[in-house]
Image: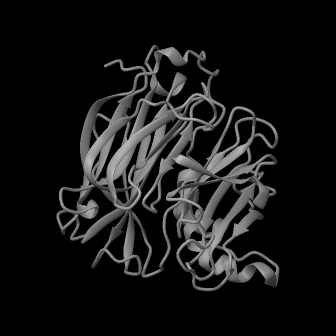
Amino acid sequence: MTVELLRTAFLGRPRGPRMLGIWRDFAAQVFAATLLLLLSPAGFGARAKDDFSLVQPLVTMEQLLWVSGKEIGSVDTFRIPLITATPRGTLLAFSEARKMSASDMGAKFIALRRSIDQGSTWSPTEFIIDDGETPDGLNLGAVKQWEPWKGRLIVCGHGTLERDGVFCLLSDDHGASWRYGSGVTGIPYGQPKQEHDFSPDECQPYELPDGSVVINARNQNNYHCHCRMILRSYDACDTLRPRDVTFDQELVDPVVAAGALATKSGIVFFSNPAHQEFRVNLTLRWSFSNGTSWQKERLQLWPGPSGYSSLAVLEGSMSGEGQAPQLYVLYEKGRYQCTESISLAKVSIYGIF
């Protein structure tokens, strides 16, 4: 599918006056998100044997994919990393190439690099979309692999800080058409927030083996804690109920976009700068209990300035015959500030080189 076809499919406005305001804030995000979503793995290969005793994550390789400061294509700043894998095992890394400054509001391209050898080498940077000066961002969606609604595409994102909350778009025909699912709005809705107001923000959906969908969200105003906000849907995001919102105090967070995914074998991984106030200490956590608790062991990827992160996994037939599953962490990294570069860490889930 070409970029123009994708643009036509996903930037058309939905019908109904009630949703138009949200759509204007959300539409540009959806186009970029869908490029990733359509290429995400779904239903490939049998689930790996649940042997959690073998899990011993180990970084086997790390390399910089983008460096800010007009080093690549005269781009001022690369930010907002996202990574996904195609069913054939190709890794696709995306970022916002902010043309003139590090500001969220400035002109930008969407940058892409790809790897066909499990992250060892990468293609040169391509600028695939000119995003103009739209104040949008990249979001990574999920593909339902289990019932209910197996095969559904789910994209969740957030509005502006004034018209805020987490909202989901759904497709049951492989992206040919989209409709709104449910959402959870900030309180007070549509008004400026104060510290400790309820305000779910940038988020990452993923599916658990029981078919429920977890949305791990940025807790914008530190409501209840300096930690992650967790939303859960049991009907593939047709509904998101306030009573299913919880807070994971084990996942301390300085208000940032984080990486989260669940493997086919049932391991949940999470990455963020593990600090209550500052964007430092990029850390990988993992859970064998669907995220209800986290292993005491953790893997520090970078102690210094670090920001947004994104996760992808190659496992089963995607990682090659006889290959151990590999996790990929794409994250903002720097010596003095986290916007200096975007780095890729390749992690062997079972600690095998």
In the picture provided, is 298 more to the left or to the right than 281?
A: right
Could you tell me residue 290's position as x and y percent? 64, 34
| Residue 31 seen in this snapshot | yes
Could you tell me residue 121's position as x and y percent? 27, 38
Q: Quadrant of residue 210?
A: top right
Could you tell me residue 84's position as x and y percent? 48, 45
| Residue 174 seen in this snapshot | no
Asked if 228 appears above or below 136 in the picture, the reply is: above
Asked if 33 appears above or below 26 in the picture, the reply is: above
Could you tell me residue 47's position as x and y percent? 63, 22
In the picture provided, is 83 more to the left or to the right than 13?
A: left
Asked if 222 appears above or below 65 in the picture, the reply is: below
> Which one is in front, 133 or 22?
22
In the picture provided, is 322 more to the left or to the right than 24?
A: left
Applied colour scheme: one colour
Q: Quadrant of residue 229?
A: bottom right
Rendered-image quadrant of the C terminus: top left
> Which one is in front, 97 or 262?
262
Q: Quadrant of residue 132?
A: bottom left
* Residue at 81% across, 57% down: 239
Asked if 38 appears above or below 265 in the picture, the reply is: below
Q: How many marks?
A: 0
* Residue at 55% across, 80% down: 194
* Residue at 63% across, 80% down: 163
Rendered-image quadrant of the N terminus: bottom right
